[in-house]
Image: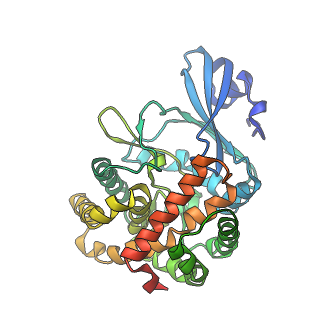
């Protein structure tokens, strides 16, 4: 078995050749994705050799211990490695080709090698998606959810997905949410809406998780947001980052995408239109209309639940870095918009 590296310094041509089975003779690495994701360290490998791609992406465990703790406890590294074994071949959305991966026994270290799709067009989440790209993304999401509609048990069993009803969420999320909130309060100006809701959020967590685990369920991407979505030359979605694949209500991914990837004014003006477009796309792919009846209720619950993302992510972020601070600030502002406009505090 290929050794799981603990740092990028352990990566050389022999290691890449052993991990991929390719004729790699030289490798040079550069870190990428700084300020975009915190649960992994992401590198672009520049390769030389016989019949090898010019570049490849390598993911290793996070550089921040707090992020490694959360990622290992929530089986995030395991899920991403197993996504390429169990789910990638069935995805109706284009995903990178996998070149191999492995996980340590404790789930705290891993590696994943995959195709570099960085040449495609991407939208900075801080700048927000325009409506046309949001519509493309919603259409792609509907195709993903329809493909896995009601067919989740096998992927939970394999470890490629984890249900939101799993007790580990109830055990871990209150702890890391509290730590993240304390950091935000100490290092940033917390939005008044967030400050009012956050202390009550943990008490509501079990109810939110239960609501988002009820039927109908599908395989949720779990982190469907602008920074993980690229567009190819035909404006088709190319999707990245599979550490949070789970079994959940379809409204979960949709609410997270709309409330976090669009500017507040764009989301406000188009939220219901995008929801209706998504429902129409599901119906067009054969999902029974009766099974979509509760999705607006789930959408609202998910929009409240998704406060967990900026709060928990802040634990592993360097908030003196402007890009990371902007991302956390914007995510909280967008969450506050949803809480106010969708009357989400009523759910508490």
Q: Nearer the viewer, residue 57 or 133?
A: 133
Residue beneath the point at 50% across and 58% down: 330
The spot of residue 16 in percent (x, y) is 68, 27
In the depicted structure, whether residue 238 falls above or below residue 225: above
The spot of residue 251 in percent (x, y) is 38, 68
In-image side of 120 versus 163 (left or right): left
Residue beneath the point at 50% across and 72% down: 305
The spot of residue 322 in percent (x, y) is 60, 48
In the depicted structure, whether residue 91 falls above or below residue 289: above
Residue beneath the point at 32% across and 55% down: 138
Would residue 295 be seen by someone viewing this image from the given angle?
yes
In the depicted structure, whether residue 140 falls above or below residue 204: above
In-image side of 263 versus 87 (left or right): left
- The structure's colour scheme is rainbow
The spot of residue 166 in percent (x, y) is 59, 72
Residue beneath the point at 56% across and 58% down: 328
Q: State which quarter of the image contains the N terminus.
A: top right
Would residue 81 be seen by someone viewing this image from the given angle?
no
Report the number of discs. 0
Q: Nearer the viewer, residue 294 or 101?
A: 294
Q: Nearer the viewer, residue 341 or 79?
A: 341
In-image side of 128 versus 35 (left or right): left
**Outermost front residue:** 189
């Amino acid at each position: 078995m290929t050794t799981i590296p603990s740092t990028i310094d352990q990566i050389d041509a022999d290691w890449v050749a052993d991990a991929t089975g390719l004729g790699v003779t030289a490798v040079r690495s550069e870190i990428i994705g700084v300020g975009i994701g915190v649960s992994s360290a992401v590198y672009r490998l520049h390769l030389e050799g016989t019949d090898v791609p010019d570049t490849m992406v390598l993911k290793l465990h996070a550089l921040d211990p707090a992020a490694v703790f959360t990622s290992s406890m929530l089986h995030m590294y395991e899920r991403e490695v197993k996504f390429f074994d169990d789910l990638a071949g069935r995805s109706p959305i284009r995903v990178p080709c996998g070149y191999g991966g492995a996980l340590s026994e404790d789930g705290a270290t891993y590696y994943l090698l995959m195709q570099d799709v960085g040449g495609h067009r991407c939208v900075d989440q801080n700048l927000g998606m325009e409506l046309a790209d949001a519509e493309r993304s919603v259409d792609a999401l509907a195709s993903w959810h329809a493909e896995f509609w009601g067919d989740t048990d096998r992927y939970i069993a394999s470890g490629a997905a984890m249900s939101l009803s799993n007790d580990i969420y109830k055990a871990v999320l209150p702890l890391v949410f509290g730590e993240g909130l304390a950091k935000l309060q100490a290092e940033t100006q917390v939005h008044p809406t967030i400050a009012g809701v956050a202390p009550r959020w943990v008490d509501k967590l079990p109810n939110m998780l239960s609501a988002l685990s009820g039927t109908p369920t599908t395989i949720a991407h779990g982190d469907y947001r602008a920074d993980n979505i690229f567009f190819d030359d035909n404006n088709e979605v190319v999707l990245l980052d599979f550490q949070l694949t789970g079994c959940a209500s379809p409204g979960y991914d949709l609410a997270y995408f709309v409330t976090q990837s669009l500017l507040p004014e764009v989301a406000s003006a188009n939220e219901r239109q995008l929801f209706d477009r998504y429902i129409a796309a599901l119906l067009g792919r054969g999902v029974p209309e009766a099974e979509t009846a509760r999705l607006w209720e789930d959408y609202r619950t998910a929009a409240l639940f998704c406060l967990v993302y900026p709060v928990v992510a802040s634990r592993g972020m360097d908030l003196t870095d402007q890009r990371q601070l902007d991302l956390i600030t914007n995510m909280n502002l967008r969450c506050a918009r949803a809480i106010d406009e969708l009357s989400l505090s009523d759910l508490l």
